[in-house]
Image (tube, helix red, strand yellow):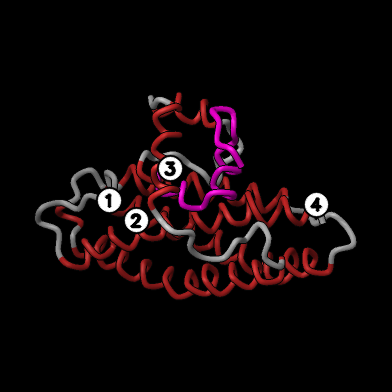
Amino acid sequence: MDITTESRVGEIAAHHPLATRVFARHGIDFCCGGGVPLSRACERRGLSPDRLIAEMHEELAGAPREGEDWLRAPVADLVDHIVTVYHDSLREELPRLEAMARKVARVHAERDPEERLPAILATLLALKAELEDHMEREEQVLFPQILEGGGEAPVEPFVDDHEAAGESLSQLRVLTEGYRPPAAACNTWRALWAGLEALEQAMHQHIHLENNVLFPRAARA
């Protein structure tokens, strides 16, 4: 796939996975916002599309092709990858983040005059509940329908869920000021910020694989 200013961000990410490094570097949403042309995504960030394309070409030329080609691998392998790499890790990581968020909100309330810590905890708890329900419905309903074939799977509600998750992640980034902990933050506080940033990065890849790869492949099957 040639990359042009009118190529959709999600399609670029699907055909050229290493290009997501450039998107992440410049804060371009390639998962929930993957349906927009590169020109519009760059306009929103005040970036030159031509310079971004050149940067992506450098990234693609300078690194070997890695990982599975999920555009061509069996759909069953892709579903298994999503469940084992993303769903299983979320079920382990979300409770850990919740425990840290509760501890930081409880112990360091006096260092939080703007009361952001309770807002972070509330946002994380809402996101955790949404993701747990979302993953359960995917594994019990959507993924079996995709694997069985024989009809178009109802992906729209799941895309809507992804949009809501993306909004929660954006809110967490704002509340944490880009995951920059205060100078006096304790180790748990710093670990929470690092964990939330890692969650955001993993969720972007997770949602991208579903929105831009799995769901379009299921629709074409």
**Secondary structure category for the residue under label 1:** loop
Of the numbered discs 3 and 4, the one sitting upstream in the chain is: 3
> Does residue 108 appear left or right of residue 168 in this picture?
left
Residue drawn at x 44%, y 41% is 57
Regarding mark 2 in the picture, which secondary structure is present there? Answer: helix
Estimate the spatial distance between the alpha carbons at disc 1 and disc 4, rounded to whole Å: 39 Å
Question: Marks 3/4: CA distance?
Answer: 27 Å
Q: Which residue is mark 1?
A: 179
Amino acid, disc 2: Glu
Extreme right residue here? Answer: 150
Q: Nearer the viewer, residue 199 or 14?
A: 14
Q: Circle 2 is placed at which residue position?
A: 197
Q: Earlier in the sequence, mark 1 or mark 4?
A: 1
Q: Which residue is mark 4?
A: 220
Look at the image and say whether residue 13 sits in the magenta stretch. yes
Q: Marks 2 and 3: CB-CB under 8 Å?
A: no
The residue where tag 3 is placed is 23
Q: Work out whether mark 2 precedes mark 1 in sequence or the reverse, and give the earlier one.
A: 1
Q: What span is colored magenta in the figure?
A: 1-22
Q: At which x and y percent is residue 4? A: 55, 31
Q: CA distance from mark 2 to mark 1?
A: 6 Å
Spot the residue most to the left. 184
Which quadrant of the figure has residue 109? Answer: bottom left
Q: Amino acid at mark 4?
A: Arg
